Image (cartoon, grey):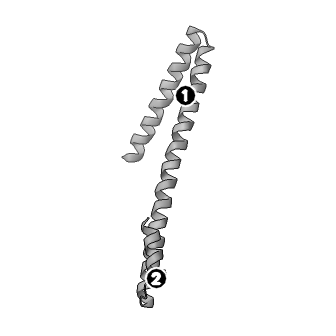
Amino acid sequence: LFTRLSDTLVSTAHFRAEVTRKIRTTRDEEIRKLKKADEGEKAGERRLEAEKKKKEMRDTRLKGLSAEEQRKFLEKEREKGQKKQEKRMSRKA
């Protein structure tokens, strides 16, 4: 909406060259900001989809295992999570 307003102003009104240039640069900056926000939103949606798919694969894999195998799998998973946490903590410090 605001980008169209600036286009209309520039095309119909008679501004000095520097004013027209400033309007165009501001318009381009706003368009860039909108695109960046849209890309960020799409990236978040893709990340959520990937997490959902990963969880579904994990669940189907767990369903096929026996109780003992499930216990071992969950234990390994927990250990991996703890190692990741330790790495994060050591990097922050």
The correct choice, above or below, for 38 with respect to 33 in the image is above
Which residue of the protein is positioned furthest toward the front in this rendering? 12
Residue at 41% of width from left, 88% of height from top?
Answer: 15
Q: Assign a secondary structure to mark 1.
A: helix
User: Depth-wise, is mark 2 or mark 1 nearer the camera?
Assistant: 2
Quadrant in the picture for residue 55:
top right
**Marks 2 and 1, how far apart at CA:** 56 Å
Is residue 57 found left or right of 18 in the rendered image? right
Left or right placement of residue 16 versus residue 50 in this view = left
**Closest to the observer, 64 or 25:** 25
Locate residue 57, reporting x and y percent.
Answer: 60, 26
N-terminal of the two: label 2 or label 1? 2
Res. 25 visible in picture? no
Q: Is residue 66 left or right of residue 87?
A: right
Q: Residue reaching furthest top? A: 67
**Where is 13 relative to 49, above or below?**
below
- x, y percent for residue 53: 58, 31
Q: Which mark is residue 55?
A: 1
Number of residues whose C-alpha sits closer than 10 Å to that of mark 1, classed few (under 14), some (14–19) or many (20 or more):
few
Residue drawn at (43%, 41%) of the image? 88
The residue lying toward the viewer, choosing from 66 and 53, is 53
Of 21 and 54, nearer the camera is: 21
Q: Do the residues under discs 2 and 1 have CB atoms within 8 angstroms?
A: no
- Could you tell me which quadrant the N terminus lies in? bottom left
Does residue 52 lie above or below 31 as drawn?
Answer: above
Tell me residue 40's x, y (percent). 49, 52
Q: Secondary structure at mark 2?
A: helix
Question: Where in the figure is residue 63, as x and y percent of width and height?
Answer: 59, 15
Residue 60 in view in this figure: yes
| The label number, if any, that marks residue 12 in the structure image | 2
Disc 1 marks a residue whose amino acid type is Lys
Amino acid residing under circle 2: Thr
